[in-house]
Image: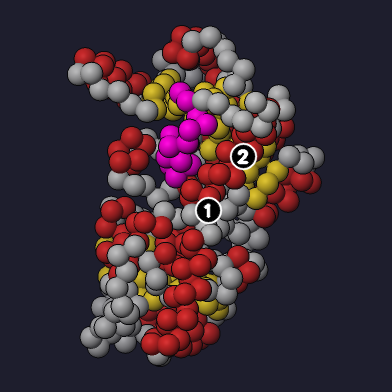
Amino acid sequence: MPGELSAARLLFCGADPDWEGSLIRNARRRNLAFLRAFLEAEEIGDVYVLRMTSRLAFLREQWAIRRRRRQGETARATPVYVTRWIPERDWLPWASRVNRALMRGLVRRRLGPARADTVVWCYALRGMLVADLLGLEGQWFVDTDHDVLNDPNRRSIGFARTEALILRCARQAKRVFSASRSMLAWLDRNGVRNCSRLRNGVRRERFEARGPAPRRGARPRLGYVGVLSPWIDFTFLLDLARRHPEWQLVIAGPWYRQGPVMELERLDNVELMGAVHSEDVPGLLAGLDVGLGLYHPAPWLDVDSMKLYEYLAAGLPVVSTRFHPHLREDFEGLVAVAEGVSDFAAEVEAILGWGEDERSRWLARCDDFVSRNTWELRAREALAAIREGLTSA
């Protein structure tokens, strides 16, 4: 029937290395949130997760697949891993061509005959690299997530190669998604018109057990939960901690022992927790008074921060740096936005001074916002685009 999508085959490129365990642990990342939603969607039939791995990881995974088959285990998503068997060196100019042929042959054998209803979902640069290398056939959909072109965390394949890869994949795609306005504007300037903004979301049920406002001791607890990457304004964070020894700053997430991070370790009012398991995040947020957004301002850093969604889903008031000009608009005034340490501190103090009525009104608005920004609703947007792309093919 026109407009319906029936059991399409999905080739998902861009999953994390530990995607199987992360799905079980209710992972928070955008790529796995969409993969989980696709696995639960009636419109999607067979799902294959394609990843590039090392030679050792490839052999280990093949052994694990055979073990699961012997034990009669079945998975909703089938892993299809490829690797470069021949080292690619300048003195082996033919190696890349041979590797590509071997990988494409393996994928064809694993996937079987070509199907008209095949969907190729490419997440960020890693997904685009895999899909492009393998020459996957089907209706392509690209999700850049954020501005991957200018992200300093991006894979170091060089700016020119990154730019060419994005444009090559975007021009092949039925639809290109991004949560970043700057990424969409760049694509538009380069003649890619089939683009849509697809924001992040949150799994609301992870944070359902919400209690009253926490009552603390002498020090209010302010927290940041996320990777301490180059996106973070470490100078700002260090200044905030030094100026306000009366606050306890809880910083949870993987971090690098370099620069200001090591200076933070020396402060009595800073608690660096390191990496935190996804299932422990709700409990951690429940013990905070204020959540922190700490990205530094940059034209390309207009990310739709997932941590802000999680703070709000946990009923945790938020103060953030003004890392992009649409922050208040995007979060409907629920996130207090400040420029400079003094203004930031004033916003924190205002929240700490809330009465019960003010907190209740904020929570009611917060609940309404979260209910309209779940991963389930985001997945419906993506599935609607997939349906449209297949029916118009």
Residue 258, quarter of picture: bottom left
Whole-percent x, y for residue 101 in the image:
53, 10
- Closer to the camera, 196 or 149? 196
Whole-percent x, y for residue 283 in the image:
27, 64
- Closer to the camera, 366 or 334? 366
Residue at (33, 26) in percent of width and height: 75
Q: Which mark is residue 200?
A: 1
Q: Are marks 1 and 2 in contact (CB under 8 Å)?
A: no
Inspect this view and state whether residue 281 appears.
Answer: yes
Q: Which mark is residue 384?
A: 2
Whole-percent x, y for residue 373 in the image:
52, 58
The magenta stretch spans which residues?
A: 32-46
N-term mark: 1 or 2: 1
On the rendered structure, is 140 left or right of 90?
A: right
On the rendered structure, is 299 left or right of 130?
A: right
Residue 66, quarter of picture: top left
Residue at (25, 83) in percent of width and height: 216
Tell me: residue 228, above or below residue 360: above
**Quarter containing the N terminus:** top right
**Quarter containing the C terminus:** top right
Local packing at callout 2 (Cα closer than 10 Å; few below 14, some 14-19, many 20+) is some
Give amino acid for label 1.
Asn
Residue at (79, 46) in percent of width and height: 189
Residue at (53, 59) in percent of width and height: 372
Give me the C-alpha separation between circle 1 and circle 2.
16 Å
